[in-house]
Amino acid sequence: SITENTGSDPMVSLPSGKKEKTPKTFDVSVDFGDGEKQELNFKLEYNVGDYYISNMSTYTKDHIVEVIKLDLSVSPKLLLTKTTAKKELLCTTNDITATLQWKDRDGNNAGDGDVADVPDANNKVLKYTLPDGVQDGDSIKCSLMKEGKEVLTDAVEVDTTFTIDVERGGKRYAYVGDDVTITCKVTGVSESNVKLLDEKRLSWHIGNTPLSDGTIGKFVNGESVLQLTLTEKQKYNGVFKCSYDEEQSAEGMEVEILEYKFDPKDKTLYAEQDEKITFTITMDRISDITEKSPEIKTSSETAFVTIPEDGGTYPVTADYGDKDSVTITFVLQYKIGDKSVNVLKDDMYTKTYEVTLKKRELSVSPKILVKKIISGEKITCSSTNSNAVLKWKDNGGNDADDKDVESLDGGSGKQLQYTLPSAVNDKDVLTCVTMNNGDEGESIQVKVYNSFDIKVDRNGERYGYVGDEVSITCRLTGIDSGDLELLNDQQPTWKIGESALSQEGDTTIGKFINGASVLKLTLTEELKGVFKCAYGDKESPDGMTVRVLKSTFEPSDETRYANQDEKITFRVSSERISGYNKIPQIKTPSAQEFVDIPENGGTYSVTADYGDKDSVTIT
């Protein structure tokens, strides 16, 4: 008796009889389901004879038969081409014992010169090179022959009147980071043939470069959608075209990628209470924007704030309240351009960024190191957390050498000092980080400058009078503009000749602002000579030579007593600079014009005239 693998009943009886050799046939209907093969299990149970025979009487035999699904397919299913001659069609079957036969457009066997076997280890493949004369609407058939009979057939449909193009062609704009969709559309194909379109035969190009990423969707009603993330500006700028086999869209979609940046990029920032953090937005824009400027809104505000068209800065002050961290949400809404501008994704863009501010535990001293000789200088990283594990890293991000770091633990926090080795160079960035179970947490940096310049503005020889209030500027150059503000709590030193200038009396040395510090002082006879400034271990090579001149007005009393018509003589004396050709002048209320006096001073007489008053002022 024989059963299928399903164990179906009843058994099938075999003829009885001694040495019976008549075969028994058993038909099985094969059902592959979704698979490509089916396994049949035949089980045979029988007796050698009746119970008088002393041998083992019952035998069991198993026989497994694997049935493979017979397959025939042509490629392509649909031949989209403007010229059919010499186009190659493939017919493939998994039955390597079968015979394949191509038929021409008239149903006759294809000429021997037009067909050829294609080597394949697992299948039988027959290629058909189309001759002249194949036309739109033809159906080219391939048959699988067994024992001279046609068992399976498949056909290639021919279409030469189709059109392929990118929908919404012309020029479009999009931003880096956009998730976009671009549609390739095939038209002019019959309803039955549209179903044969295969997205695997579709490809995309930007200019002449094949597009290797993105997802090409299945054809639906002749349309296939490319889904793509525009990760890079240079990579995706250009004309997008789609191709089906060798046929390419006549026109395409020119995409101009615009860049948009939000800095800082870190999702977590560290700041002290009331510290101001500046966020910067930069964006490429289209020149004919007339309708809307970009706007930005944080979660703590009720209205959007307009920023410049090409981006701008937005300061946020850290306010933790009773928390250790706070989340700021930026929502940026803007248009690429006005209504006349074609955009690839949306006319109105909305970008949302969440930035978490955490209370800063780290600090460094100094915040920036500006020295001519930096080897051997010490910088210190401190944490308010007494359990913190600190680590210094060099400019390359490598751990600092153990011999160059020293723990200065003390008080309620932690401190780690770094003695700079000779390998540290100009504009190197040294980083202190906190370590949490082997992972890096909060970090803070110190930038190093040893190639910088310091100078006194308007150097050379300058003149002033005793009593003049003057300003002299010391300026640092060669330091990046973004780092200059780290010097805002610092000030240079000044000297006159070889003597240090102290901040006494009317002399003040200002803090650096954008790299410039202003010295303000009132000139005296002693404050003369060459003014030079210094910062760190570097002094300005040139200075300002100040010449102090004296000017006196006698009598110096601001109140004088005189009788009516009494004559009072005033005397002016002043040091002058040779070659200066303007004569000093004096004017009283009764004179209409200034009166010249000698270059180095002179006298001027005034007659007291009170009129009906007890006093009169002479200027």
Image (cartoon, helix red, strand yellow):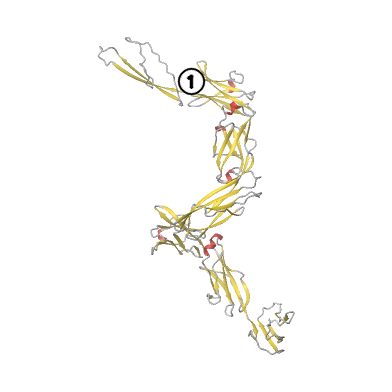
Quadrant location of the C terminus in the rendered image: bottom right
Q: How far across and how far down the image is residue 485, in percent?
A: 54, 62
Figure check: 554 above or below 23: below
Figure check: 361 above or below 168: below
Q: How far across and how far down the image is residue 239, in percent?
A: 62, 41
Figure check: 340 above or below 20: below
Residue occupying the point 61% across, 25% down:
158
Q: Is residue 12 left or right of residue 254?
A: left
Q: How far across and how far down the image is residue 465, in percent?
A: 63, 78
Residue occupying the point 59% across, 29% down:
194
Mark 1 — residue? 97
Quadrant location of the N terminus in the rendered image: top left
Q: Is residue 75 left or right of residue 23?
A: right
Amino acid type of the residue that numbered disc 1 sits on in the rendered structure: Thr
Q: How far across and how far down the image is residue 125, in percent?
A: 52, 24
Say what secondary structure mark 1 lies in: loop
In the image, 134 versus 561, the foreground residue is 561
